[in-house]
């Protein structure tokens, strides 16, 4: 069965161009012309991934992303003419997994879609042969089959990038990981200058794990990050 991708953009030319390339790559494409339409399509069609334009009339892409993250952790790529770091950080903070600035190369966009799809859905691949593995560090428990994290009895909602970071940390508690190691494991790409992406994700994980902030994930200045053994 083809994976479904929702493209939400008020520019029909963008939807048609990107849709054509994605269909040629083997995906089923669903289009939404604005934020309200995107929310309806998300509920009605249950896509496997979403590409969201930021600047849409009415409900913008950030609002759509915020609502989506309340009920789903499917991969989301933000698509926007705004390429300032502050806009990228806001999108990542709200739960986006990647960011493509307009104008863009459609072949690169398809490559990014393939990368996000591969990382996210390969987590459940081979389920018939998989043995449920729960990694426990202190009061944290990570179920690698259902890709869920618990802190005691509390469920912690994670994006798939956050899940990959926690999987790396919890598989090696106490070990220091550099930014390059974290980026290449979680994003599955060669490390470039991506400090903001990593810092944003670590900050979000800290706030989700502890009201005090640094109880679980420690920063070692000039070295990287580690998950403390509890």
Image (cartoon, helix red, strand yellow):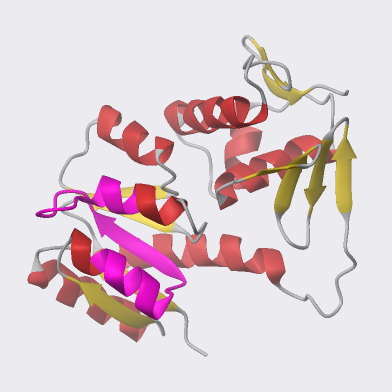
Q: In which quarter of the image is residue 183?
A: top right
Of residues 214 and 26, which is closer to you in this image? 214
The residue positioned 19% from the left and 50% from the top of the image is 60
Measured along the vertical axis of the image, is residue 148 above or below residue 23?
above
Q: In this view, does 96 lie to the left or right of 52?
A: right
The x, y position of residue 128, in whole percent, is 83, 80
Measured along the vertical axis of the image, is residue 88 above or below residue 106?
above
Q: How many marks?
A: 0
| View extreme (front): residue | 153
The x, y position of residue 85, in whole percent, is 29, 29
Q: In which quarter of the image is residue 77?
A: bottom left
The x, y position of residue 200, in whole percent, is 47, 29
> Is residue 193 in sight in this rendering?
no
Magenta includes 50?
Answer: yes
> Is residue 155 in sight in this rendering?
yes
The residue positioned 60% from the left and 32% from the top of the image is 180
Magenta includes 61?
Answer: yes
Measured along the vertical axis of the image, is residue 25 above or below residue 175?
below
Q: In this view, does 7 lie to the left or right of 114?
A: left
Q: Quadrant of residue 4?
A: bottom left
Query: In the rendered structure, which segment of residues is drawn in magenta?
Result: 38-65
Specify the quadrant that holds the C terminus.
top right
Measured along the vertical axis of the image, is residue 54 above or below residue 122?
above
The residue positioned 33% from the left and 34% from the top of the image is 90
Of residues 3 and 107, which is closer to you in this image? 3
């Amino acid at each position: 069965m083809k994976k479904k991708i929702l493209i939400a953009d008020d520019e029909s030319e963008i939807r048609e161009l990107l849709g054509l390339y994605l269909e040629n790559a083997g995906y089923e494409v669903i289009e939404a012309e604005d934020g309200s339409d995107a929310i309806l399509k998300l509920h009605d069609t249950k896509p496997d991934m979403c590409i969201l334009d930021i600047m849409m009339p009415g409900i913008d892409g950030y609002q759509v992303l915020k609502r989506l993250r309340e009920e789903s952790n499917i991969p989301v790529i933000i698509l926007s003419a705004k390429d300032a770091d502050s806009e990228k950080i806001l999108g990542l903070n709200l739960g986006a997994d990647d960011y493509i600035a307009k104008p863009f190369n459609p072949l690169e966009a398809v490559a990014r879609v393939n990368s996000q799809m591969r990382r996210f859905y390969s987590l459940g691949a081979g389920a018939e042969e998989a043995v449920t593995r729960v990694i426990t560090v202190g009061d944290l428990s990570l179920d690698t089959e259902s890709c869920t994290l618990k802190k005691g009895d509390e469920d912690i909602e994670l994006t798939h990038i956050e899940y990959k970071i926690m999987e790396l940390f919890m598989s090696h508690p106490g070990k220091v990981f550099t930014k390059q190691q974290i980026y290449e494991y979680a994003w599955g790409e060669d490390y470039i200058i991506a400090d903001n992406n990593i810092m944003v994700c670590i900050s979000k994980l800290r706030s989700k794990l502890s009201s005090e902030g640094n109880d679980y994930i420690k920063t070692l200045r000039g070295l990287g990050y580690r998950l403390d053994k509890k």
